[in-house]
């Protein structure tokens, strides 16, 4: 049967995959959504529940399937894999999820050779690189959700502190989605004014350097806190994925800090990490050459080196 367009395939119907499916259904962006999970009972149950709300949302065909369900997908969003368990090292998580991707990616390529692949599973930068290599796709068509979520958290945190609509804040988290990520304070603005200047002119006197550093720490530790409280993060990552999906399907040219293959950027090569990038119907068309401070350059290079060292152990 002919697929309905646009079609989105979601691999992994767990917390992230199913909440994304729900958000996507509400957004009305997709005409067809397929959920693929090795736990078929789970995928079928999620689809039943979603379908029961359809008359209250937008006409969408939603169903569970095997990997053949990826056929004709415009975007395949990969959320399958494990979360970091208490006591599990990042290395163990990486080995586990890389082995899942070695199984998944050839199956996706078999049925959806032309799709844009959007990787969400952690460690997302490593798995974006692994997906790029295993799929053989060009770098513009393999995207990691990267630090789009961290950047959304960053804008929210700054907005709370400064009492300004987050939409009026331009500030990015770049690098690895994880422990070595960094805030680009040197380029952060509120209503067009540099953030430090804004704080000193419009807020009551504070120790700006320390305050900004605390704001960033809150962002960096947010996922740990949420996971400790409720076991997983799902709502904000789902909206992050809707935002990226919208920019692709509607060719919006949004600037988003997605994870993408980096070449010759402050001396960084051959790793996937996040830099503000133009996202449209071709995928990631370019990443922006930010003017980073000396300290930010050092931190970004450290982030890249950390990722490169992990990739070197994987022999992909
Ligand atoms: P979850 O355990 O709830 O769901 C994962 C699903 O993947 C499960 O339903 C499981 O059955 C399925 N799965 C595992 N192996 C599979 C395979 N070979 N084929 C098909 N399905 C398979 O986990 P979650 O909370 O949804 O998180 C999923 C991933 O997303 C984790 O790695 C998590 O760390 C990551 N995550 C990333 C971000 C981000 O910003 N990049 C944010 C939140 C979560």
Image: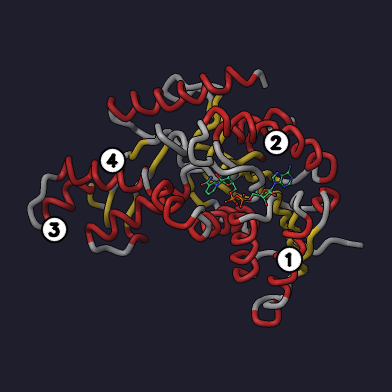
Residue under the point 56% across and 53% down: 244
From the viewer's side, name the closer residue of 88 and 10: 88
From the viewer's side, name the closer residue of 185 and 36: 36
The quadrant holding residue 128 is top right
Estimate the x, y position of residue 85 in percent, counting from the top left. Answer: 53, 41
Task: Looking at the image, tell me whether mark 3 or mark 1 is earlier in sequence order.
Answer: 1
From the viewer's side, name the closer residue of 177 and 80: 80
The residue labelled by disc 2 is 101
**Nearer the observer, disc 2 or disc 3?**
2
**Quarter of the figure with the C terminus:** top right
Q: CA distance from mark 2 to mark 3?
A: 49 Å
Determine which of the numbered discs, if any, sits on residue 202 in the image: 3
| Viewer can see residue 7 | no
Is the CB atom of the residue marked by disc 2 within 8 angstroms of ligand 1's nearest atom? no
| Viewer can see residue 299 | yes
The residue labelled by disc 1 is 45
Q: SS class of the residue under badge 4?
A: helix
């Amino acid at each position: 049967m002919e697929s309905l367009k646009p079609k989105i395939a979601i691999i992994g119907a767990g917390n992230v995959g199913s909440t994304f499916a729900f958000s996507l259904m509400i957004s009305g962006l997709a005409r067809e959504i397929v959920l693929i999970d090795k736990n078929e009972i789970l995928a079928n149950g999620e689809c039943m529940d979603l379908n029961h709300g359809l008359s209250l949302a937008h006409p969408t065909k939603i169903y569970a399937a095997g990997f053949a369900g990826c056929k004709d997908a415009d975007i395949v969003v990969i959320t399958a894999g494990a979360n970091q368990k208490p006591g599990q090292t990042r290395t163990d998580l990486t080995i586990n999820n890389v082995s899942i991707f070695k199984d998944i990616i050839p199956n996706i390529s078999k049925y959806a050779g032309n799709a844009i692949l959007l990787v969400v599973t952690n460690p997302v930068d490593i798995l974006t690189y692994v997906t790029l290599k295993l799929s053989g796709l060009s770098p513009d068509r393999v995207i990691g959700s990267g630090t789009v979520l961290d950047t959304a958290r960053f804008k929210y945190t700054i907005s709370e502190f400064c009492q300004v609509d987050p939409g009026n804040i331009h500030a990015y988290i770049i690098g690895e989605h994880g422990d070595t990520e960094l805030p680009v304070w040197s380029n952060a603005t509120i209503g067009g004014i540099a953030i430090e200047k804004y704080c000193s002119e419009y807020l009551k006197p504070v120790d700006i350097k320390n305050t900004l550093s605390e704001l960033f720490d809150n962002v960096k530790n947010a996922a740990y806190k949420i996971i400790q409280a409720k076991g997983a993060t799902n709502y904000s990552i789902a909206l992050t994925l809707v935002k990226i999906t919208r920019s692709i399907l509607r060719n919006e040219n949004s600037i988003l800090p997605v994870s993408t293959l980096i070449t010759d950027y402050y001396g960084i090569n051959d790793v996937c990490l996040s830099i503000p990038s133009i996202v449209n119907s071709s995928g990631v068309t370019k990443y922006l050459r930010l003017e980073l401070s000396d300290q930010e350059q050092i931190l970004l290079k450290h982030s890249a080196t950390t990722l490169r060292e992990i990739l070197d152990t994987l022999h992909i």
